[in-house]
Image: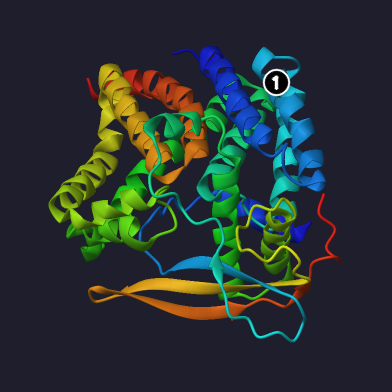
Amino acid sequence: MTLETALRLTEIITGFAFAQQSIEHLTSFRSERLLFFPRLILSLLLIIGFQAKWITALLVLSGLAILKYFQGPYNGGADRMSLLIIFCLSLALFAPTPYWQEVALGYLALQLLLSYFISGWVKIVNPDWRSGRALSDVFLFSAYPVSDSLRLWANSPRLLLFMSWAVMIFELLFPLSLLSETGLYIALFIAASFHFSNACFFGLNRFFWIWIAAYPALLWFQSRIFPLLLNNIL
Amino acid sequence: MLQTLKLFLPALLPSWRFFDVIAPSPRIQFTLLNTENENPTKWSEFRPRPEFLPFITMLKRLLWNPQWNESLFMVSCAERLIEHPNRHSEEEILKRIIREYKKNNLNQGNLTASYLQFRLILIQRQDNQLEQTIVFHSRIQPLHRQNVQ
């Protein structure tokens, strides 16, 4: 994937994710509507590619205003990823040379990679995750399951043990998917399915859209970095 | 400005430690009171989960999930309140419960209440049992003085 394609795809998917987030606030308090209605307009402009450079800068400012209004992220990691993506995108679009554009998008790709790898690492060093108990606790008493019937999954320790290890192994091995383009497409499909299941079971819909928005950066990164690495090795 | 930058830094250098530890989980309960000095006897969970959620509803929530996301934000506010009591988080929770009351969505029966209070319950596992502890009581908020828009 070329740098230009990756940047444009990131603009479109991020614009969609931001629009989806913003629309959810339009039925809330007046002060929230005042914050999110302009953000919705900016997101739509980003999707159509109108003055993308300045729109991303305004979206960074809008993200900071939202962070200040809620005294922190409204939706935890999804808000943080939103800010990271729009900040890197803005840096890339304002960058004076292609080299600095690549640095900005490369940083986003690296953070996406780390988002999976570190999540896997912090789980596997925890004995509760290795025994399946941590995932059982998520279903048993955390605030996330969207219905009481889902809490019954806590009574299936073997299934949860299998799911815990599947998640940990996938997250830890995710960086290896960079070794081939096909491998990366497969890994991103599995990762998107993982976010999809989190959206269904735990209502984390914003994570699903915003993580996908960072995928073009990683696809570009793989096609940019690995030919260089192979050339150096061979 | 400095405070906003402090909030922005974790987005630029994220820790990505999702679910590293399954921490005790807060629940928000509220009570409606007729007078400021009334002793609360009935506490109700705010937005209890449905027994079952059809898959089609889960799919729709991929695009439209404002109430659930607001509930998760209220959980964050509850966690912040337990860690470092602050007026902002208390206000955020109070104003959202009051808005639900004014829409008659609370199903608590008391439609003529003048005051509202919430409390936070922390749920955690102790060996094989779930343990609940009351960790915070909000101020008693007059309902008619809260402007909900």
Report whether A34 appears left or right of A23. Answer: right
Quadrant in which the N terminus of chain A appears? top left
The residue at 32%/49% (across/down) is A150
Quadrant in which the C terminus of chain A appears? top left
The percent position of residue A90, horizontal first and vertical second, equals 67, 30
Foreground residue, A118 or B96? Answer: B96
The residue at 33%/36% (across/down) is A194
Report whether A138 appears left or right of B106. Answer: left
Label 1 crowd bin: few (<14), some (14–19), many (20+), radius 10 Å: some
The residue at 33%/18% (across/down) is A227
The percent position of residue A57, horizontal first and vertical second, equals 74, 32
The percent position of residue A118, horizontal first and vertical second, equals 36, 49
The residue at 65%/17% (across/down) is A47
The percent position of residue A160, horizontal first and vertical second, equals 20, 51
| Residue at numbered disc 1 | A44
Foreground residue, B32 or A189? Answer: B32
Report whether B19 appears left or right of A48. Answer: left
